[in-house]
Amino acid sequence: MPPITIYTTSWCPYCAAAKSLLTRKGAAFEEIDVESGPGLRQQMTARAGGRTSVPQIFIGERHVGGSDDLHALDARGELDPLLAA
């Protein structure tokens, strides 16, 4: 399984939904709370091509997007193969 990184905040319901889906899939992920240190939101924004909202999700080096994007991948049957790559 490729490494998964999810940039979050502690109070974000979309972050919770994305983490819940990944957990249900049995996928381990690194969570980075963008409010926990200086520069983390800027790091996320640069890595996510300018997107500033959380969550921002990366599977391997692929930028998946946010929670809605992750759930759409799952609905299309594309998430499981991506997690297995």
Image (tube, rainbow, N blue to C red):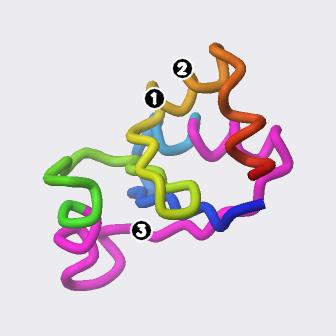
Residue tagged by mark 2? Answer: 72
Indicate which disc residue 33 carries: 3
Q: Is residue 40 magenta?
A: yes
Judging depth in this view, the residue of 4 and 62 nearest the camera is 62
23 horizontally vs 37: left or right: right
Q: Residue furthest front?
A: 85
Q: Residue at x 62, y 46 (%)?
A: 19
Q: Are marks 3 and 2 in contact (CB under 8 Å)?
A: no
Circle 2: residue type:
Ala
Q: Quadrant of residue 70?
A: top right
Q: Is residue 69 magenta?
A: no
**Residue 80 rendering spot, x and y as whole percentages:** 77, 35
The stretch in magenta equals: 18-44
Indicate which disc residue 27 carries: none
Q: Residue at x 71, y 20 (%)?
A: 77
Judging depth in this view, the residue of 67 and 14 nearest the camera is 67
Q: Nearer the viewer, mark 3 or mark 2?
A: 2
Residue tagged by mark 1? Answer: 69
Q: How far apart are the alpha carbons under marks 1 and 2?
A: 5 Å
Tell me: residue 55, above or below residue 44. Answer: above
Tell me: residue 1, above or below residue 73. Answer: below
Mark sitting earlier along the chain (1/3): 3
Label 3: state its secondary structure.
strand
Could you classify mark 3 by the number of other residues whose Cα lies within 10 Å: few (under 14), some (14-19), or many (20 or more)? some
**Residue 69 rendering spot, x and y as whole percentages:** 45, 29
Q: Are marks 1 and 2 in contact (CB under 8 Å)?
A: yes
Q: How far apart are the alpha carbons under marks 3 and 2?
A: 23 Å
